[in-house]
């Protein structure tokens, strides 16, 4: 398992994806499902929130988040009119619990800050959703040291445009950066930009 001391000390900045790199995305999604389940029970009286939440959880674990409303709609007869409510929660949900960073990543970020290196978050997600997540994450004081870029506002990863923007904006060279990600897209993003890459699994 890699630690900060194992990394190239000549690097000046680190680029992270948000979801499943700094925190587990399932922690956000499961709370959205919980809130929607309680909304449905309060509005319709059926199904019970606990049953609906449990179905959401199992569906997510087996199939992921894609088309999950359709699975719930089919299983419980949820009215199509509630799709907008479900989608709105994705963007604006006020979570019951703060999102917590992976403990190893919290330590890594803290050590980067102590060493006076720069931290960039470059995320492919929809900006309004990612902002909502970031605002409800427990950063332990690190929020003052983060610079966030939403790739969709420039060009989505793996295209390297946002990377080129960061390099120019912060007067950095490609060899100054490390990219830490979790997906093949992150790996391709690093390769297309000519930047060293590490998978999150190296730190876990």
Image (tube, rainbow, N blue to C red):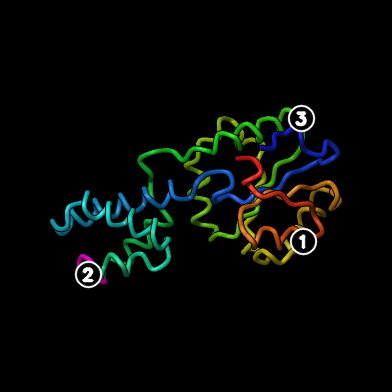
Judging depth in this view, the residue of 147 and 163 nearest the camera is 163
Q: Callout 3: 10 Å neighbours few (<14), some, many (20+)?
A: few
Instruction: Report the residue at 77% width, 43% height from top.
Output: 13
Q: Is residue 48 magenta?
A: no
Judging depth in this view, the residue of 89 and 72 nearest the camera is 72
Residue 91 location in percent, x, y? 43, 57
Q: Magenta segment range?
A: 75-80
Q: Secondary structure at mark 1?
A: helix
Give the distance between the C-alpha atoms of the residues marked 2 and 1, in whole angstroms.
45 Å
On screen, residue 23 above or below 144: below
Q: Nearer the viewer, mark 2 or mark 1?
A: 1
Q: Is residue 44 left or right of residue 12?
A: left
Judging depth in this view, the residue of 103 and 18 nearest the camera is 103
Residue 20 location in percent, x, y? 54, 49
User: Which residue corresponds to mark 3?
Assistant: 115
N-terminal of the pair, mark 2 or mark 3, is 2
**Whether label 2 touches label 1, CB < 8 Å:** no
User: Which residue corresponds to mark 1?
Assistant: 191
Q: Is residue 19 left or right of residue 121?
A: left
On screen, residue 138 above or below 171: above
N-terminal of the pair, mark 3 or mark 1, is 3
Give the distance between the C-alpha atoms of the residues marked 2 and 3, in whole angstroms.
53 Å
Give the distance between the C-alpha atoms of the residues marked 3 and 1, in whole angstroms.
26 Å
User: Which residue corresponds to mark 2?
Assistant: 79
Location of the C terminus (image quadrant): top right
């Amino acid at each position: 398992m890699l630690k900060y001391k194992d990394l190239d000390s000549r690097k000046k900045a680190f680029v992270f994806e948000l979801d499943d790199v700094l925190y587990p995305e399932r922690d956000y999604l499961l709370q959205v499902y919980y809130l929607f389940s309680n909304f449905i029970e309060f509005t319709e009286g059926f199904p019970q929130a606990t049953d609906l939440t449990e179905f959401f959880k199992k569906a997510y674990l087996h199939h992921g988040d894609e088309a999950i409303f359709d699975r719930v709609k089919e299983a419980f007869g949820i009215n199509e009119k509630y799709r907008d409510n479900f989608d709105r929660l994705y963007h604006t949900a006020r979570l019951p619990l703060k999102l917590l960073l992976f403990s190893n990543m919290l330590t890594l970020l803290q050590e980067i800050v102590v060493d006076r290196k720069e931290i960039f978050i470059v995320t492919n997600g929809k900006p309004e959703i990612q902002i909502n997540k970031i605002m409800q994450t427990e950063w332990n004081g690190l929020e003052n040291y983060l610079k966030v870029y939403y790739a969709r506002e420039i060009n989505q990863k793996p295209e390297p445009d946002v990377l080129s923007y960061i390099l120019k904006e912060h007067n950095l060279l490609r060899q100054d950066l490390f990219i830490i990600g979790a997906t093949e897209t992150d790996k391709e993003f690093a390769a297309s930009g000519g930047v060293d890459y590490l998978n999150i699994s190296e730190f876990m």
